Amino acid sequence: MPEIDDNAEAERTRSALGAAGASGTWDWHIDSGILHADAQFAELYDLDPQQAQAGVPAETFFSAIHPDDRARMRIAVAGILGGAELFSKEFRIVTPDGATLWVHGRGRSFLDANDEPIRFTGLLVDVTERKRTEERLRIAQSAGGVGTFEYTDGFATVAVSDEFCRLLGLHPATSLPVRTINNVVQPGDAPLIPQPRSGIIPDTLDGVFRVSRSNDGAERWIARRGEIIRERSGYRLIGVIYDVTQTKEQEARLLELNETLEMRVEQELTERRRTEEALRQAQKMEAVGQLTGGIAHDFNNLLTIIIGNVDAVLRRFDVSSDPRARRSLENALQGANRAASLTQRLLAFSRRQPLDPRPTDVARLLAGMSDLLTRSIGGAIAVQIDAEAPGLWRVEADPHQLENVILNLAVNGRDAMPDGGTLTIAAHNHVVRDEDAPASVPAGYYVCISVTDAGVGMSAETLARVFDPFFTTKEVGKGTGLGLSMVYGFVKQSGGHITIESAEGSGTVVRLFLPRNLDNEHAPAAPMVVAAQGSPSETILVVEDDDDVRAYTVGILRELGYRVAEAHDGATAVRLFDRDEFSVDLLLTDVVMPAMSGRELADILWDRQPELSVLFVSGYPRDAIVSDGRLDPAVDLIPKPFTYLGLAGKVRELLDRRPSRT
């Protein structure tokens, strides 16, 4: 190997590490046992900067490492000294003022002509905030909660999320006084957060509290879950709260049933089993729904940025220049779209996905899916569609989500027939009378959509768990276990019901019972909208608190030819709207924003300009524009993540819908 120019190599190393934004760099000369470090490293280790630059004993590297991590890091460094080339470890450092920081140490060794290590250089990057974020997310996932909080011993305030404030009826804020939080707890219950300097450290964060919401006085049961993290200077509480009022009420009803059980043994036993099953499903959906709802907004913002920018690069990419790079971009886009689909399936299962129901012709929908089903199912499976029954009723459902449900069931049927076979999709009118109503389908008028396969079928044990989230009989990596859970959530959110009949070796029949639509029975199907270019004479006001999402959205609209104004919050948007030089044709606003929501902003601007077109954008709109899981009347929404073509088409649709100006 060529000899290493120590000084030149050190200078190149320092330049590269400084450009990387390091929190400290080192250069360990192994043969002399001397370690050279920059000023940032010296500050972390409480060293004199000039002394650190001139050189200190190599053992100094371990002096500031947290005692619980020191042995592990000695082993890792020993590997470098023994001949390993690359070093990448995360560990804790205790700063001179007693604070604990997480750092990511990255480095490499340099070898001499005999392949013996002679130098070990690297950098430290502060990753404390990321580690704390990961810690909070892990706790939220394990507890299944929504409202998050973090409290440090001795402080008078608590870091909280917006959902934490909403659950307690408090005005949204990033931090709240401990006293304000504890004031909503009913007398006689322990405080939700320990009073500062009270000397009381809870043994566990698990607990249930009765609260009177600050804004409306409503009495609710709030559960608290989380962890107590002890540190050298005290402790931190990190956890979640969520509403368990419905669970408490159901438990009270179960208790009442037990007290009267002797008088109504047979009747009450049956009712109790139904109630317990409903409670189990409700708790399961509550946990997944709260977790999904809590992360869906931020997660879909990230996916919007990822999908949008990859899509933008692909639209400008010359495949002839680098086909391998294009394939990599397409794979990245495919992965991001799968992540978006996973989030939507979780929201569908928990019935928190905003639906846009409309009178839907099932026969026409199935006929339009024929080519898609044939391509998706494959040549070994024959697909038969039977929806030609005369007088087939319409249903009120979100047609796009209904297509997803049918496609999902068809793919499941294909997977159940590895040797090929016939998949039958049928639809017919179905009336359930009171005297004939089974437990799973109440009396009413329905359109029954059935998907039948001649596959391997399911055992009774599998059939009992088929709607459970993340339950799958497929091989690892072959399925998420959310397909039928998503179908179940969509059907229930649409006011319908679902049944499954199956036995091992006898195939499976899945039946969806969707309520008949009695209004607009003969309403025409909504026309397909084709994306078109805009005009500088059309002005769009974009309001989005996420800078990257806003930049992506504004970029699309300007590329399409529109005049665009942008604002990062509602107050700024109102000021822009009121300027004389602005005449806004369309407001495009995020739904969930701090201080002023998108719906509140729209209401303000509608008062000024009633004919203003409004397009809401959200990854998870919560209750702002949704009632009973359905979009409010006359509300237009494009969900995140969205694509260039999707946004272009929706904007053009709304602008073309306006009354003509004379």
Image: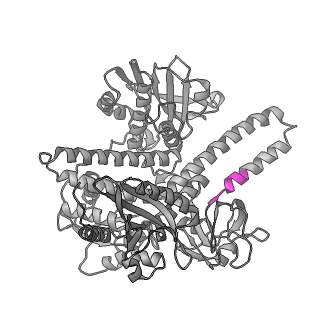
State the residue in front, 494 or 360.
494
Vertical side of 94 occupied by 335: above or below: above
Examine the rendered structure and indicate whether residue 137 appears above or below residue 465: below
Seen in the picture, residue 111 relative to 38 is either above or below; the reply is above
Residue 303 in which image quadrant = bottom left
Q: Is residue 340 left or right of residue 461?
A: left
Q: Is residue 141 shown to the viewer in this render?
A: yes
Colouring of the image: one colour
Q: Is residue 248 magenta?
A: yes
Q: In this orientation, which residue lies closer to the viewer: 270 or 295?
A: 295
> Which residue is drawn at the image coordinates 73% and 63% (left, top)?
203
State how many labels appear. Answer: 0
Is residue 155 found inside the magenta-colored segment of the image?
no
Look at the image and give the residue range highlighted in magenta: 242-249
Q: Quarter of the image containing the N terminus?
A: bottom left
Tell me: residue 430, above or below residue 481. above
The answer to which image quadrant residue 578 occupies is bottom left
Observer-nearest residue: 475 or 390? 475
User: x%, y% of residue 39?
Assistant: 39, 79
Q: Is residue 385 left or right of residue 346?
A: left
Residue 627 visible, this angle: no
Dominant SS in magenta? helix
**In the image, farthest residue toward the left:** 320
Residue at left offset 68%, top offset 62%: 205
The quadrant in which the C terminus is found is: bottom left
Where residue 138 appears, as percent x and y from the top left, is: 55, 56
Task: Say which residue appears at 48% left-offset and 75% top-offset.
Answer: 45
x then y, percent, for residue 18: 31, 71
